[in-house]
Every structure is written in structure tokens, then in C-alpha cells.
């Protein structure tokens, strides 16, 4: 494991790390009058869309 | 007629509205602060043609829109978190009016208070581990024998039998590392492994975790990680930290009664 010492903190925020948190973390308020799409659905819709757009050759998200 | 809604980013305690007065939120609209007692809701006005349910469904399928919106959402929370304790909301939480947001602050005040209490003065850090790409030089017999006995045995097996044993051995190493770093944190959470098509990574991910730490100094976590890496021996892992993050991963609240 010696080659893994001193891991660097990624300077540019990777979209994929951000989406992990924004689509599966954060407070979900249930039962109030929000317009937000149901949470499980939100994750599925977005990840499917992301994979589809990457596959379509738009390149990996930054 | 244009229908408008109120996009809710998060709820803060002790936030001076002046500190976010210059911020732009999603769709470029100015960020506002709605207060209820000591609680401050960070909101901005959005067009429901874009952020209403049909619009949202359409837009979430658009990678460019999703990225712009996610980065704007995060920028607002990260800016507020520099000045006050903040509990982030899930991406795309939208009310029909500021009145709806105020009602939530009034009805769920105790819930937000408890969540704020948990995360106040804490930071979240991400840890990702990958299998080293194939072709990484295998340790010599001497190096392998210098590892703890079980490690050397597994490494020899791995070299003899190929990738599967190596992967299995790495999984044990990863579990040990996660346990050790979790023990140094006040809370931890494992996320699903990222799809290489999304991350652009050719390396195989074996750990995607988040840890909540008092203060903002990661040294405590790094120390635990390094100790665990020492004990795990020469696993072919590469690790990366991300953060500090707003505590997205540690604000789960009880559902409504």
C-alpha cells in the first residue's frame, strides 16, 4: 500500500461525487406540499439520464 | 402567466443574511433568507415551467441542466456553511411559495434543531478506494514475505490464481479500512460504488464512503487510515479523499409522524 500514501485531495469537485450526495443525501421532507419528485425516483431518473448521455458520446461528466 | 415557486437549499442557524446577499442560486436567481426564530431557510425563486414536476422530470434527464443545477445548489450551501451551521435539503426541493417554506420551518423546527445540533462544528469527508490497475508490479517474494503471514499467503494465491482472489483480498482490506476510519469519526456512511461511465474512472472502485468529523481537520481520519493500511499490508489499493463537504450524508431526519 506504500504507493497510496499521501493521497491528494481532488481540487475540482467531481460531479459524480456531488451527485452521490445531492441525490441520496440531504434532508427529504415527506408529506409537505413540495413539488419535488419522489427521492428514489429522482436518483433513478438522474443516474439513468447520466449514463445515457455518457453512452451517447457526450463524454464523462467533469 | 408565469407560475413561480420557492426552491429550498437548506436550513441554517445563526446565519447573518448579509453573508449570502450576493449569492446567485439555481437558474441564476438571487438567494434570499426566510427566518423563523433562530432558523434561516435559504431559498430562491424559480419558474415552475422549469422546476415544476413535468419540467423537473424533463430537465433531470439533461446532463447539462443537472450539472449546472447541482453545482449551483452546492455553491449556495457551501457559502452559507462558511458562516453558520447548515442542514442541506435534497436536490430539487420546491414549494409553491415562501409561505410553504415558512410553514415547514414552523412545523419541523424541532427536527431541524436536532439535525443542526448534530452537524454543528462538524465536517464531512469522502474517501474513495480503487483497485490498482492491472500491470502494477507485483511485490517480490521478499516483499510479500515481509507482510503479515496471512497477507503474504493471500498475495501468493492472488498472483497464482489471478484477479478474483486479489479482489476478494482487497474487499477484506477495504472493510478493515472502513471500520478503522469509521471508528475515528462520529458517523460514517457507505455510498454505492460509482459507475465508471459516470466517474470517467478506468480503475475499479472498491470503496465510496463518507465520514463525519468534529472540526475541520482531516488529520484524525488520515491517521486512522494509515494505521489500517499498515495493518492491511500491501493491498493493491489507491485511495483518494474529497472534502470538506457540507454534511449532506449525515442529516437524515425522522419521517413525519
Image (cartoon, rainbow, N blue to C red):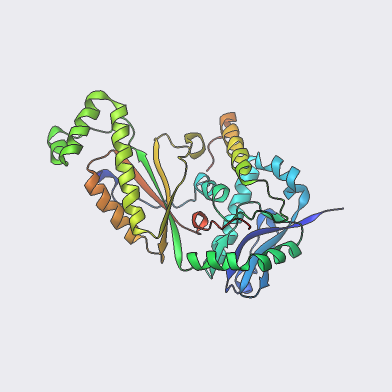
Residue B4 lies, in percent from the top left, at: 79, 56
Total numbered circles: 0
Question: Left or right: where does residue B57 sit relative to residue A21?
Answer: right
Residue A19 lies, in percent from the top left, at: 55, 47
Q: Please state, as top left, top right, bottom left or bottom right, where the C terminus of chain B lies in the image.
A: bottom right
Up the image or down, B64 lies above or below B123; here it is above
Pick whichever, B64 or B216, lies toward us. B216
Question: Left or right: where does residue B205 sit relative to residue A37?
Answer: left
- Quadrant of res B142: top left
Pick whichever, A41 or B222, lies toward us. A41
Up the image or down, B222 lies above or below B59; here it is below
Question: Left or right: where does residue A60 sit relative to residue B233?
Answer: right
Up the image or down, B98 lies above or below B51; here it is below
Residue B121 lies, in percent from the top left, at: 46, 68
Outermost residue on the top side: it is: B161
Residue drawn at point x = 48 percent, y = 65 percent: B118
Residue drawn at point x = 47 percent, y = 41 percent: B192
Residue B140 lies, in percent from the top left, at: 16, 33
Outermost residue on the front side: it is: B257
Residue B32 seen: no
Residue A8 seen: yes
Outermost residue on the right side: it is: B1
Amino acid at each position: 500500500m506504500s504507493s497510496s500514501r499521501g493521497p491528494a485531495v481532488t481540487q475540482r469537485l467531481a460531479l459524480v461525487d456531488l451527485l452521490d450526495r445531492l441525490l441520496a443525501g440531504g434532508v427529504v421532507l415527506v408529506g409537505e406540499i413540495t413539488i419535488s419528485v419522489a427521492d428514489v425516483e429522482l436518483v433513478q431518473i438522474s443516474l439513468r439520464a447520466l449514463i445515457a448521455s455518457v453512452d451517447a458520446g457526450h463524454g464523462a461528466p467533469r | 402567466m408565469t407560475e413561480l415557486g420557492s426552491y429550498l437549499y437548506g436550513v441554517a442557524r445563526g446565519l447573518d443574511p448579509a453573508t449570502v446577499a450576493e449569492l446567485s442560486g439555481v437558474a441564476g436567481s438571487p438567494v434570499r433568507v426566510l427566518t423563523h426564530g433562530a432558523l434561516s431557510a435559504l431559498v430562491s425563486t424559480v419558474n415552475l415551467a422549469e422546476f415544476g414536476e413535468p419540467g423537473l422530470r424533463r430537465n433531470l434527464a439533461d446532463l447539462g441542466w443537472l450539472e449546472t443545477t447541482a453545482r449551483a445548489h452546492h455553491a449556495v450551501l457551501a457559502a452559507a456553511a462558511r458562516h453558520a451551521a447548515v442542514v442541506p435539503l435534497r436536490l430539487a426541493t420546491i414549494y409553491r411559495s415562501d409561505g410553504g417554506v415558512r410553514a415547514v420551518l414552523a412545523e419541523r423546527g424541532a427536527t431541524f434543531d436536532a439535525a443542526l445540533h448534530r452537524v454543528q462544528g462538524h465536517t464531512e469527508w469522502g474517501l474513495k478506494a480503487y483497485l490498482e490497475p492491472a500491470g502494477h508490479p507485483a511485490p517480490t517474494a521478499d516483499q510479500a514475505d515481509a507482510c503479515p503471514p496471512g497477507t503474504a499467503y493471500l498475495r501468493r494465491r492472488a498472483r497464482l490464481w489471478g484477479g478474483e482472489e486479489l479482489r476478494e483480498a482487497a474487499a477484506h482490506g477495504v472493510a478493515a479500512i472502513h471500520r478503522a476510519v469509521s471508528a475515528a469519526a462520529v458517523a460514517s456512511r457507505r455510498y454505492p460504488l460509482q459507475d465508471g461511465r459516470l466517474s470517467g474512472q478506468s480503475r475499479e472502485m472498491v470503496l465510496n464512503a463518507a465520514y463525519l468529523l468534529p472540526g475541520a481537520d482531516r488529520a484524525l481520519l488520515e491517521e486512522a487510515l494509515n494505521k489500517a493500511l499498515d495493518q492491511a499490508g500491501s493491498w493493491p489499493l489507491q485511495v483518494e479523499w474529497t472534502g470538506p463537504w457540507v454534511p449532506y450524508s449525515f442529516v437524515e431526519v425522522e419521517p413525519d409522524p
